Image (cartoon, rainbow, N blue to C red):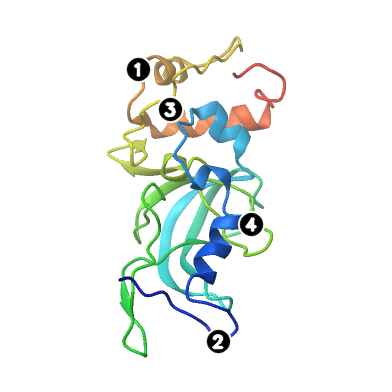
Amino acid sequence: MMKFYRPARLAGPFTTLLLWLAIMPAQATQLVQQNLTKLISGSEIIISGQVTKVTDGFAKNGIPFTEVTIAVSGAPKGADPAQSTYTFRQFGLLAPRTLDDGTRYLGLSPVGFARWQEGEIVVAFLHKPAAKTGMQSTTGLAQGKFALHGGKYVNQFDNQGLFDGVAINVPDLTNAQHNLLKQGGPADATAFMDLIRRAVDEKWVEQGEMR
């Protein structure tokens, strides 16, 4: 039987888990397909950059976390463009660990959550941090974290559904941006970032020009 870490201030072995389940975003309970329009509209912060540090541990309230630090190269939405790094915590550990009392703790980030590696170049679409815990998940979970491979951005689902149903009604999309919408799959890095920046700066979603 899996045993859960129990800090002294919590009442029972499942308190930490139940607390998280009560406050985690609705998207964290089931993986709902998110296209690019939904990722943009559902994110408080969108940043790009290199993952410089990935660690894990337990918060003071006993909730397990993975902490990610990104050296910011671009901040299309929500973040201060002058901020050199952005650090956040998502729920769950990187790997099982043995606690001081010999208990084996298995509270990893759930299936469907984004996975992070030091050194990778990413685009991260992030929800607002949870009010009670400060935990922050990517929008659409793993759908909202893109890593750079061979000049293209791709999420853990190979961008499946990313451009499904996306319609953009602006007159001056570039050929590269049109190709993103038509071809799907791994997204050309430059065209992808340009499209995101334009969508945010020109308020395409808010004005109904991107659906």
Which numbered circle lies on residue 162? Answer: 3
Q: For the residue marked with disc 4, what is the amino acid?
A: Ala
Q: Which residue is mark 2?
A: 8
Q: Circle 1: is it few (<14), some (14-19), or many (20+) Cα within 10 Å?
A: few
Instruction: Give coordinates of residue 129: x percent, y percent.
Output: 63, 56
Q: Which residue is mark 1?
A: 183
Q: CA distance from mark 3 to mark 4?
A: 25 Å
Query: Could you say whether the residue bearing mark 1 is in a helix, strand or loop?
Result: helix
Q: CA distance from mark 3 to mark 1?
A: 11 Å
Mark sitting earlier along the chain (3/2): 2
On screen, residue 74 versus residue 66, left or right, reads right
- Mark nearest the camera among 4 and 1 is 4
Q: Is residue 145 visible?
A: yes
Mark sitting earlier along the chain (3/4): 4
Which numbered circle lies on residue 149? Answer: none
Please name the residue shown 39% across and 50% down the image.
Answer: 121
Q: Quadrant of the N terminus?
A: bottom left
Which numbered circle lies on residue 130? Answer: 4
